[in-house]
Amino acid sequence: MISPAPNSLFLAGPTAVGKTGVAILLAERLEAEIISVDSMLVYRGMDIGTAKPSANDRERVRHHLIDVADLSQPFDAAQFVRLALAAEDEIRARGRRVLYCGGTGLYFKALLEGLGESPATDPAIRAELERTPPDELLSELARCDPATYQTIHRANLRRVIRALEVMRVSGRPYSELRAPWQARVGDANPPRMIGLRRTLADLHARINARVDAMFQAGLVAEVRHLLDRGLAENRNAMQALGYRQVAEHLQGERSLPETIELVKRRTRQFAKRQMTWFKNQAAVEWVDLATGTTGEMAAVQVENTLTFKHLGWPTP
């Protein structure tokens, strides 16, 4: 397999919008399995702060690409694509359907558009770039690759550094190394991406409630345990919402109530960035969920949106 099959279904949206519950209901009805498109659910032990599907959820519907990496292991978009396509082959070999679900835009983009010809990481160049002030990094990117500079989120220094690293190693702009997937022979329709969205007030209320529930469920103890296992050394994992903020709390930087409010604010900001990405970078068919919409109601709305003949799936 060189790309997702055209009758795969993609379910996307911002954090706390209700994707997991809807995906499980859809998968049960459509005899599908779920492939997680989430850069943090891959890590073992990061359970509470990532809102990882429960053991019961994973018994109801088989999930893939959850708990596939230790904190000591690096994990990137290339690994995600390789494992996701292998999982899709495995699912289809068992006669099941495939439902991708998540909110990591970069992983969706890598899966649907390809990884291009980006070279491997160069530790020396990476270390030099990480020591460079952010304004100098952005100036270099604007000068050497204006196309990437216009589209990249400039507060995401990890991506800025990667783009510059690729340029220095390859001698070519990062924007030139993006390559689309080779189309399959006979594929007439691209995979469909359905997005869930709510009003800002509703989404913010759900985010605040989720964060409160995470702390009540033991997020502080989870972070303390993971720090003993090397969480702080994994730059990618430390970007997960809540984990850095709780680690700073444990180091005495702020009180617990202040930390909880900070995590809520950071999560709301993250949800806004997710929505901006999906609006600008992906062809999403949006399903608007009213305040109070349950998972069951949302699943019905998604079913009514889908053209099951297009997907090659039976009408429920």
Image: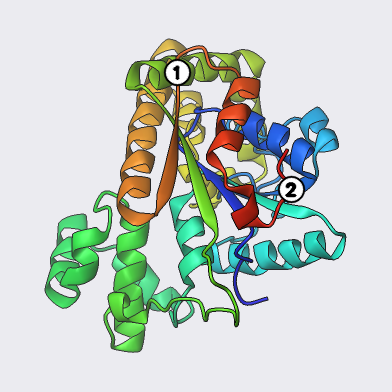
Vertical position of residue 13 compared to residue 128: above or below: above
Residue behind mark 2: 314
Indicate the position of residue 202 as horizontal and vertical percent values.
Answer: 41, 16
Judge whether residue 253 can be spotted in this image.
no
- The residue nearer to you, when weighing 56 against 41, is 56
Residue 187 is drawn in which quadrant?
bottom right
- Quadrant of the snapshot with the C terminus: top right
The amino acid type found where label 1 is placed reads Ala
Judge whether residue 204 can be spotted in this image.
yes
- The residue nearer to you, when weighing 57 against 120, is 57
Q: Secondary structure at mark 2?
A: loop
The amino acid type found where label 2 is placed reads Pro
Indicate the position of residue 300 as horizontal and vertical percent values.
Answer: 62, 28
Residue behind mark 1: 290
Q: Is residue 253 left or right of residue 195?
A: left
Tell which circle, 1 or 2, labels the residue nearer the N-terminal end: 1
Q: Residues within 10 Å of mark 2 (few under 14, many from 20)?
A: few
Label disc, if present, on residue 192 of the rendered structure: none
- Quadrant of the snapshot with the N terminus: bottom right
Q: Residue at x 32, y 46 (%)?
A: 279
- The residue nearer to you, when weighing 162 against 26, is 26
Vertical position of residue 23 compared to residue 141: above or below: above
Mark 1–mark 2 distance (CA, rounded to whole Å): 27 Å
Indicate the position of residue 263 as horizontal and vertical percent values.
Answer: 42, 25
Q: Residues within 10 Å of mark 1 (few under 14, many from 20)?
A: few
